[in-house]
Image (spheres, grey):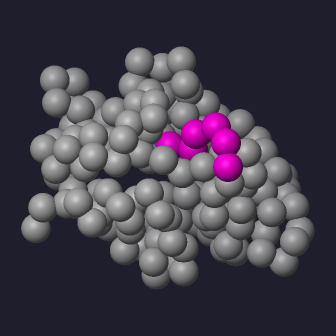
Amino acid sequence: MDDFWVFGYGSLMWNPGFEVIKREQATVFGLHRALCIYSWVYRGTPKKPGLVLGLDHGGSCRGVALKAPGKMREEIISYLRAREQVTAVYLESWRKVELDGGKRVDALIYRVDQNHEQYAARLSIDKQVEIVNSSHGKSGPNTDYVISTVDHLRECGIHDHQLEQVRAGIKS
């Protein structure tokens, strides 16, 4: 079975949880990174949801394309489904991503389902900051998630203006 690509735009970039043969910075067009998902498990609860990242419609997103071994395809996809689909808020699909050298490859992506009840459409930066500062879930405070994400994106040389604005509003 052929090796395959997975597109990471958040924690998959630095913590994929599966064997990676190669990693390359990449861009997906037509989708952008956003705090657009109410987190009921990892960074919040159903009564006090947090916010986590999703790929939402429009724009583009810089991230990392992770090349995975084809011999582990089913195992890796099963792992990703268990990790990403806890509440089925993401739509799994294959999409063209452009590697930094200009080559286009098909990559497995997880984008937000805009019809899902956890979809947090177009919240203002102030509202995002308010939610992030006040929510906590199974994996800890929502503030830790945003701070860690921004730090890791910076390490990859990726500047996300909206996330940086939310990060600036986090209480110390």
Q: Position of residue 7 (x, y in %)?
A: 65, 56
Vertical side of 95 occupied by 38: above or below: above
Which residue is rendered at x = 40% and y = 59% of the image? 163
Which residue is rendered at x = 64% and y = 37% of the image? 57
Which residue is rendered at x = 61% and y = 31% of the image? 91
Q: Quadrant of the C terminus?
A: bottom left
Q: Position of residue 99 (x, y in %)?
A: 79, 69
Residue 86 visible at all: no
Query: In front here: 161 or 24?
Result: 161
Residue 26 in which image quadrant: bottom right
Query: In front here: 122 or 99?
Result: 122
Residue 67 falls left or right of residue 45: right
Residue 135 in which image quadrant: top left
**Where are the magenta residues, as a range?**
54-59
Q: Position of residue 150 (x, y in %)?
A: 38, 68
Q: Position of residue 40 (x, y in %)?
A: 27, 31
Q: Residue furthest right?
A: 103
Check if residue 56 falls in the magenta segment.
yes
Q: Main secondary structure of the magenta part?
A: strand
Residue 128 visible at all: yes
Which residue is rendered at x = 23% and y = 32% of the image? 49
